[in-house]
Structure formats: C-alpha cells, structure tokens
Image: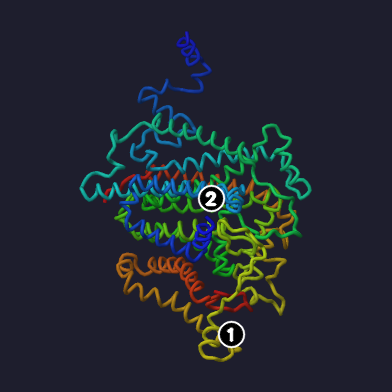
C-alpha cells in the first residue's frame, strides 16, 4: 500500500520534472543527487573519508554558514516590524517581544549572532591547527580573515539597532576608538599637523569617526547608517565573499588532507 | 568560605591571573601527551562546571554570570577547552603514528573515498536540526538583553563595548586608543592574512600535528588564548565601574578608590634618574623612549636574525623575515608592556600628549 503510493508519487510527471534521477541508493544516483541540485552541488559527488570526518572539520565552517542563513531569515522577518528611527526603534523592539505571536525572532537573531561569532573563531582555529592555510589555500585563508572581520562588523552594527542604553553606549565606546586614528581622527597622532593657513583640517566635525557616526555623537543619523550597513551593505559584501570562499574551497582541492612531501 | 573567596578574588587580579594562565599555557604544551588523555578532558570540563556551579551561590558572582550578553562567554568556556583538547588528542596520536612509521589518522580510514550522499549530506542535515533545536530552546529560555531606552545624557558605569571587542578595550589599560583601538586591530587582521606567506614550513599541511610545527602553533595559540580570549574574559567578568578590577565575588562598588601611581619613562629618566626637571624640548624629553622604541623595532630584529631566529632568517629571506618579526614584536609588546606596568608602574614609554602620541 505505502510502497505503491511512494512509487506513484516518485513516478509522477511533477516529481520526475524536479528530481531528474532515481532514489539515491545506487552510486550513479548518489552522484546525481548531489550534482543535479543547485544547493548540494557546492559539494563534490565524492569526498575523502578522512576529510569529512567530524573530528577533523569540527563542522564549524558549516555551522557558521548555517547561522548566516538563519540570521538572514530571522533578520528579514524582523525588518517587517522594525523602524530605524529614534522615535520608534525601542518601542518596536519591545513590541517584537510583547505583541508579536511567538515573539522569539529577536532572541533567535541575537543568540544566533553571538553563536556565529564563536563558530567563525573556532572555524579559523581549526583551519590553523590543521595547517589548511598552507599552499595552495593561502588566498582562501585571506578571504576567510576578511569574512571573520565582516562577521564582527555585522554583529557590531546590529548591536546598535535595539536603541537601548546597552546599544548606544557599547557603540559609543567602540566608535570612540576612531577618534584616535592616526592623521584621520581628531584625537589621533599627526592630525594636529594637517592644517591649512592655521586652520585644522581634521576636527570633530569631519574626521573618520564623524563619517562613521554621521554626526559628532551616536544619534538618529547613526542609527539609520548602521541599519543600512547591517541590513544591506555588509550582507551584500559578505555574500559575494562567501561565494568566493566556497568556490575556492573546491578549486583548491576540497577539504584539506595530508599533503605528501 | 570567605577566606577561599578572598584567595580567588586575589588570584583573579590581572597580574596573578595572566601570569598563572601563561604558566598553565606553557605547561600544557610541554606535557601535551598527558593533557591529550581523556582523563584530562574529564578533569578539565568537570572542574570548570563545578567551579561555576559552586560559585553560583554567591550573589555578586551570579549577577555578573547571568547578564544576558555574558552567556556567549560561558559557551566559549565550554567549547574552547573541549576543541583544544580534541586537537591535542589527534595531534599526539598523529605524532606517535609518524614516529612509529604508521599512516596518519586522516589517511588511515577505509574506504578512502565515499559518496557525499549520504556520508556528508546526512550529517549536515542532522547538524542543522540539532542547531535549530538548540537555538529555539535557548531563545525561549533566555530573553535577549533589553535595557532602558537610549539616553545620551546618562552614561552607564562601566560603559562596555560588545563582548567580542572587550579584549581590545582591556588593552586600553596598557596602550592608548590609537594603538589599542586602531593600529593593533589592523595588525591583527593584516597579520592573520600574512600567516600563509610567513609560515614556510611545508609540514603539517592538512593534518593534526604538534611536533612538526610547534613554534607556529604556540605563537598562534598564545595570541588566541592569552591575548584575545583571556582578555575578553577579564574585560567582561572582572572589570567593573571606572574599568577597575573586581574579583568574581566582589561587589561592583563605583566608589572603589584605586591610586593612580603610573609614571612615564621620561619622568623616570629625567626626574628620578638625573634629578632634574623635564626638558622643554619634546624630542629631548622623550629621547629615552624614542631610543627604546627604536631599538625594539629597528635594532632588535637584526640581533634576533643573527641569534635566536637565525634559522628562520635563512628560511624566510629578508622581506618575509621582517614582516614576521615586526608582527611578532608588536604582538609581544602587549605582554611586555603589561609586565612593565605591573613591576615598574610604567605608564608611557613615549609620552607626547600634546600630539596624542603616547606609546
């Protein structure tokens, strides 16, 4: 009864139009299951057993990517409710918890973000310990370092959006560092030498911190700026770099394994 | 009980905490084969958990521990020791295999090659399900942090950056913002990207090992564990109002008085050493600091290339060696400045506050 139902479904024109191969129980169909699926074909059809073992990879790259997708999905849902203005941001945050049914989207987003930072650190740690940055993977390690930096930047820009005391003061402390940028910050070494006919060129109203905050302190313009960076700019860059990262993993020979000397 | 708490409070001060951590760090690498036993893992994990549970009875400890954004650091404290042990276990196994002429554990599997469906796709699916469930349980159990509405007129004390930047904020105790907040973060990112081009050791590519690349692993782990994770921990749990130190069982008293006794190198040299006033000319005044910094960054590399790092210099060549040594010395400037602060109360080596140029 069940068998004939399954045969009927998998034999139907709809099913065969989507999955153009039989059940993945034979080597040929196992390979086709991976190769003919746009998502799964990130993988090769076959892989070295020593490379895909959990104790070797710790699965941390995969966990990082999973958390990125989870954050993208919960982030899109949060954008339906959240308005990045000083007037509404905080009350929208409260409403997300109090009035939205099953309001754990914000929790999923925040805890997922923290976990992603940890997962990316552990991924880098594993790649270092297995020496997987060595030739031919030098370039991809560099891409990975930029991805790590972008992960921290995404987390940092997102930190401001709740618009509570924790948010604005953490971002104030973080961005205060930019004041001290050599030559580009108004309290940085060398900035005092950049003058034109006795007028300081670098001051609190035009230095690198001003550019970051869109103002002299963390205000509504900063909120909008960080919102756009968080939801559009950084995700746009990180998606491109993730694509390069995955592409190069395959092109550099897949998951690393012992290189014979 | 109070005496024990006082001892732990004392041990958690930056000086003993970082010193003891460094001793433990090197002891683990010296006796790695003992650390790699499963009994060590059990002992380590259970002592972390037992310490946390036993301390949870203390009001002050509980208050810091249960701040919502401190949860990730508790997770790090469980995951990082575990994964470090997992590395040690596999590295020691491989080093023994190499010594005995047996194949590495990464090769010593049958069959050598498998189909990705189901051998990789299924574990990935299980991982996704487990992660999703864990995240949902965590999110239902613990609310995301939410404080009062933003108020630019009311500065909280302490004001802290997000937890993953607290290592950098802790660095501000020892270095000015232009170094701790701008130069060092840039050097960390640039230095990480430079690793594959500096590390010319062809061994240890694609498998776990310690004996074939001990220097690379110890330097990286020192930076990661001591100069990053430990400082994040210190900045999160042990720094209270006015960024003063507070032990794990100590109340965060915003009126705690800490004497400021730090002295610049120029004051040491001119006032204490020569018994005269500081010279007017900035360059004369700071000459001792400039000489020391110049020696550290320009002369020391040459000396090291001729002595301790002679082999490296031969292997790496002039340019690679200089990139390596500048990154290495920048990294080591952090512990050096710490020790100078703890022993001599040294504030700045070069102090030109007129131009925000303090080292």
Q: Nearer the viewer, mark 2 or mark 1?
A: 2
Most distant residue in the right direction: A87
Q: Which residue is label 2 attached to?
A: B55
Frontmost residue, A198 versus B66: B66
Sequence-wise first label, 2 or 1: 2
Residue drawn at (56%, 63%), measured in percent from left and top? B170
Q: How is the image coloured?
A: rainbow
Q: In the picture shown, does residue A108 fall above or below B260?
A: above
Subunit of label 1: B
Q: Is residue B189 visible?
A: no
Q: In the picture shown, does residue A111 fall above or below B194?
A: above
Q: From the viewer's perspective, is B57 left or right of B42?
A: right
Q: Residue A35, how many percent across, how many down? A: 43, 31
Subunit of label 2: B
Q: Residue A22, how many percent across, how many down? A: 42, 20
Name which quarter of the figure residue A42 lies in: top left
Q: Residue B105, how many percent across, how many down? A: 29, 42
* Secondary structure state at the residue bearing disc 2: helix
Q: Which residue is label 1 attached to?
A: B282
Name which quarter of the figure residue B262 lies in: bottom right
Name which quarter of the figure residue A248 lies in: top left
Q: What whole-number distance in Å separates the C-alpha atoms at marks 2 and 1?
A: 52 Å
Residue drawn at (55%, 69%), measured in percent from left and top? B175
* Secondary structure state at the residue bearing disc 1: helix
Q: From the viewer's perspective, is B320 left or right of B242?
A: left
Q: Residue A67, how many percent across, how many down? A: 54, 41
Label 2 CA crowd tier, 10 Å (few <14, some 14–19, many 20+): some
């Amino acid at each position: 009864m069940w068998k004939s139902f399954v045969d009927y479904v998998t034999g139907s024109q709809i099913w065969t139009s989507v999955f153009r191969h039989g059940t993945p129980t034979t080597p040929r169909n196992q390979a086709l299951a991976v190769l003919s699926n746009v998502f799964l074909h990130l993988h090769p059809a076959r892989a070295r057993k020593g490379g895909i073992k959990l104790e070797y990879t710790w699965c941390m790259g995969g966990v990082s990517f999973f958390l990125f997708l989870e954050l993208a999905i919960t982030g899109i849902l949060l954008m339906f409710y959240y308005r990045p203005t000083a007037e509404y941001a905080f009350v929208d945050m409260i409403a997300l918890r109090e009035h939205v049914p099953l309001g754990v989207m914000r929790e999923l987003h925040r805890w997922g973000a923290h976990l992603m930072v940890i997962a990316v650190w552990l991924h880098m740690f594993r790649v270092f310990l297995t020496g997987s940055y060595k030739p031919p993977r030098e370039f991809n390690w560099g891409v990975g370092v930029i991805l790590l930096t972008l992960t921290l930047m995404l987390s940092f820009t997102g930190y401001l959006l709740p618009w509570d005391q924790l948010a604005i003061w953490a971002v104030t402390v973080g961005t205060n560092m930019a004041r001290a940028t050599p030559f580009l910050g108004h309290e940085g070494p060398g900035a005092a030498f950049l003058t034109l006919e006795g007028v300081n060129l670098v001051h609190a109203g035009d230095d690198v911190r001003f550019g970051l905050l869109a103002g002299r302190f963390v205000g509504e313009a900063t909120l909008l700026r960080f919102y756009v960076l968080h939801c559009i700019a950084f995700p746009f860059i990180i998606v491109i770099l993730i694509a390069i990262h995955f592409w190069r993993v395959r092109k550099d020979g897949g998951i690393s394994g012992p290189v014979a000397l | 009980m109070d005496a024990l708490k006082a001892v732990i409070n004392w041990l958690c001060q930056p000086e003993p905490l970082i010193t003891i951590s460094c001793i433990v760090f090197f002891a683990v690498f010296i006796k790695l084969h003992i650390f790699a036993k499963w009994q060590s893992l059990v002992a380590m994990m259970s002592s972390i958990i037992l310490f946390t549970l036993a301390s949870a009875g203390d009001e002050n400890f509980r208050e810091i521990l249960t701040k919502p954004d401190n949860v990730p650091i508790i997770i790090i404290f469980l995951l990082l020791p575990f994964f470090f042990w997992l590395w040690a276990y596999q590295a020691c196994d491989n080093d023994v295999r190499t010594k005995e002429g047996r194949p590495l554990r990464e090769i010593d599997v049958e069959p050598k090659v498998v189909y990705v469906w189901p051998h990789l796709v299924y574990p990935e699916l299980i991982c996704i399900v487990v992660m999703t469930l864990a995240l949902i349980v965590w999110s239902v159990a613990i609310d995301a942090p939410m404080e009062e509405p933003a108020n630019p007129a009311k500065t909280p004390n302490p004001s802290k950056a997000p937890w993953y930047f607290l290592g950098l904020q802790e660095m501000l105790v020892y270095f000015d913002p232009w170094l701790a907040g701008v130069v060092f973060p840039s050097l960390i990112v640039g230095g990480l990207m430079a690793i594959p081009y500096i590390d010319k050791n062809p061994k240890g590519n694609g498998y776990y090992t310690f004996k074939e690349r001990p220097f690379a692993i110890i330097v990286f782990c020192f930076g990661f564990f001591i100069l990053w994770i430990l400082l994040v921990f210190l900045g999160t749990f042990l720094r209270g109002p006015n960024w003063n130190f507070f032990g794990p069982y100590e109340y965060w008293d915003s009126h705690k008085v800490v004497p400021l006794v730090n002295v610049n190198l120029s004051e040491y040299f001119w006032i204490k050493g020569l018994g005269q006033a500081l010279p007017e000319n900035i360059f004369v005044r700071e000459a001792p600091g400039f000489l020391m910094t110049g020696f550290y960054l320009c002369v020391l590399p040459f000396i090291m290339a001729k002595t301790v790092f002679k082999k490296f210099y031969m292997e790496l060549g002039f340019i690679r060696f200089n990139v390596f040594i500048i990154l290495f010395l920048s990294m080591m400037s952090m512990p050096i400045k710490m020790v100078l602060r703890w022993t001599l109360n040294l504030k700045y080596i070069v102090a030109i506050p007129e131009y925000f140029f303090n080292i």
